[in-house]
Structure formats: C-alpha cells, structure tokens
Amino acid sequence: QVQLVESGGGLVQAGGSLRLSCAASGRTSSIYAIGWFRQASGKDREFVSAINWTGGRTWYADSVKDRFTISRDNAMNTVYLQMNSLKPEDTAVYYCAARFGLGFYDAVVSYKNWGQGTQVTVSS
C-alpha cells in the first residue's frame, strides 16, 4: 500500500507563490507517477500536473503551464508543486494521488491512493 500526505497550502495574495509537498510512504517502488489535482468549491476535480516517478517526465494543464513547476526528490519520496504567479482562480483544495501503471495522465480515474488535500486560497 502507498500513503500520500499533502502539505504546504495556505493563504496568499494574487501574484504570490506557494510550494506544495506530497510525501509518499509504503510501497513507493510500485508508483508509476504522481499527479496533482485540484477541486474548487462546487466544481469537479481537475488535473493540474503530473510527474513520472522514475524518469521525471512531466505534464501540465494549460491553465498552469509556465506558472507551476512539478519536481520530485526520490531520496525523500516527495513530489513538489511550486506555484508562482498565483491567481484567485487557483483557489482550491489541492490533492496528490498515485498512478501505478499506464493510463491517461490527466484523468482522475487513472489515479489511486489520494491524499487528504491541502487548501490553497489566493486573495485578489
């Protein structure tokens, strides 16, 4: 089993930055990729970014490309999401989840073992 715990959320003004962390424990050798998703109040959960656990290949939603950067520290079993130039529309609960094989990198159904989420609020 794999457990994921997010941290790093908070309140920030528009234009500011935050770094989210996703710490993995358990059978991390079974992880194929880690994805970040977000869910704003009253909206569906949407893909933000993902990273291949070993090779480092990355994917981004168009809405965050050039503002967010995903990275990993395999020694620490942690994936980071650096969020710059934040906008009020980035306000959401951010979740990380694991993918254990091939699949659509941006599909919620491709991921399992979701963390509890961390709130990001961007004020205007």
Image (cartoon, rainbow, N blue to C red):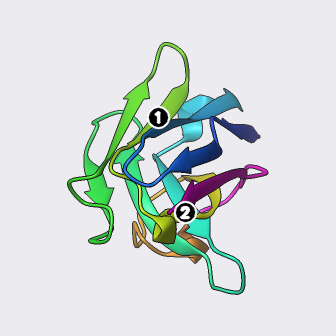
107 over 86 or under it: above or below = below
Residue 80's disc is 1
Task: Name the amino acid type tagged 2.
Answer: Phe
Asked whether, in this view, residue 1 is left or right of residue 49, the answer is right
Residue stretch in magenta? 111-124
Question: Which residue bears the numbered disc 2?
Answer: 37
Rendered location of residue 74, percent (x, y): 45, 21
Which residue is at 49% across, 75% downward? 107
Residue depicted at x 33% and y 50% = 85
Q: Where, by quadrant of the figure, is residue 59 drawn?
A: bottom left
**For the image shown, how many numbered marks are present on the structure?**
2
Return the residue found at the far top. 75
Q: Secondary structure at mark 2?
A: strand
Front residue of 27/96: it is 96
Assess disc 1: are there few (<14), some (14-19) or many (≥20) residues with their C-alpha within 10 Å of its C-alpha: many
For residue 49, what is the image quadrant?
Answer: bottom left
Q: N-terminal of the two: label 1 or label 2? A: 2
Horizontal arrangement in the rendering, residue 59 relative to residue 101 (left or right):
left
| Left or right: 113, with 28 as reference point | right
**Can residue 27 be seen by looking at this rendering?**
no
Answer yes or no: is residue 12 visible.
yes
Q: Does residue 54 lie above or below 119 as drawn?
A: above
- Label 2 neighbour load within 10 Å: few <14, some 14-19, many 20+: many
